[in-house]
Amino acid sequence: MESEEISSECCGSGCTNCILDQIIRSQNLIRNVDESSILPIGYYRAFKCTLIEQIMDNTFLFRFRLVPTDEEQQKQLIVAPGSHLMLRIFKNWRFANRPFNSIFSKWRSSMAQFKNTETRDRRRVVEKHDKTELDLYLSRPYTPIRVNCDEKSFDVLIKLESGGEMSEYLLTLHTDDVTEWKGAYTGFFWKRNMHKHLFGFVQGVGLAPVYSIMANILNDEEDETLLNLWYCCKDMDSILLRSDLQAMSHYWNFKSVIYLSREKCSCGGRTSRNCLCLSSKKRYNEQIFNHRLEKQDIQNLLEKVAPDSVQVLICGNESFAELIVACITELHIENYYKF
């Protein structure tokens, strides 16, 4: 009976998610399976978009709130920190002639330099579907940075991609539009004071899962884990959740360091890793360096702690993850997780 219900809800993006739904319990990859959960395995739920806010040129914050049925009024929105949810849309959404949302005008104008042929080529690369009669939907995973249990809502940061099919759809999303989500999926689970040190190495929008985990730990007064977040961005304008990170730095057990790979330098100190150009741009107590994160930086940080007292979280592109893993392996640190 369960498999029939899951099949009827198939997202059509391939069998991966459906396989997860059926075997994930035995692998312990979904941690929030609960009879009181609004998001049980295998089912999509309706969530209304209640907020769209531009965070930077290509990144927007979206808030979605549950459209509850009568029997769901007493249930909770349970999303473990670091988990991701799946958003699905109909593949033929363009036939609905959805109106463009003007909040994205600036971003779309900046993308006008891309030729139509390039956009079509990129779209073909991005799309990947199960070529069957059930191939009706396109789905993508997104990690909530905040979950409001009382309001049954969550926030996600989404970086728009030129030519991306989901990005093209999101350009037509307005507040009060209803979307479909399911989950939550995760392979990482944190237990209070599980390790003395938790280090996060993140890149760009890869900040989302690690930020949500660390913010949750800081909200737990009985968790005394020492948190270190090392965040790599392109430049000052690319720093996500900057005010949130600054607020978190007021906690005794949290520290963040930001590395900028492409920030301009006029003092000539960038090559010597001693750039002074950022002095006037930094906020109180911020640690920001105008150079790329390198192996020596990672080793200088981690060699000061006992290997068995550390948990490392990694979220970034493949080359970034390979650098971090190579460094921690040399230092005999075995506890790490890649999102």
Image (cartoon, rainbow, N blue to C red):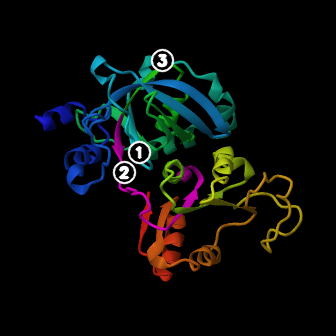
Magenta span contains residue 57:
no
Q: Residues within 10 Å of mark 3 (few under 14, many from 20)?
A: few
Q: Which residue is mark 2?
A: 186
Q: Which residue is mark 1?
A: 84
Question: Earlier along the polypeptide chain: callout 1 or callout 2?
Answer: 1
Q: Secondary structure at mark 1?
A: strand
Choose between 106 and 27: the one closer to the eye. 27
Total residue callouts: 3
Q: What residue is rendered at 48% in x and 71% in y?
A: 310
Q: Amino acid at mark 1?
A: His
**174 is higher (above) or lower (below) than 295:** above
Res 333 visible: no
Q: Are marks 1 and 2 in contact (CB under 8 Å)?
A: yes
Magenta span contains residue 186:
yes
Q: Which residue is mark 3?
A: 97
User: In the rendered view, does 71 fall on the left or right side of 95?
Assistant: left
User: In the rendered view, does 110 fall on the left or right side of 88?
Assistant: right
Rounded to the nearest angstrom, the CA distance separating label 2 from label 3 is 35 Å
Q: Secondary structure at mark 2?
A: loop
Q: Secondary structure at mark 3?
A: loop
Image quadrant for the C terminus?
bottom left
Q: Residues within 10 Å of mark 1 (few under 14, many from 20)?
A: many
Res 171 visible: yes
Choose between 329 and 252: the one closer to the eye. 252
Q: Amino acid at mark 2?
A: Thr
Magenta residues (range) = 182-208
Question: Earlier along the polypeptide chain: callout 1 or callout 3?
Answer: 1
Choose between 319 and 143: the one closer to the eye. 143
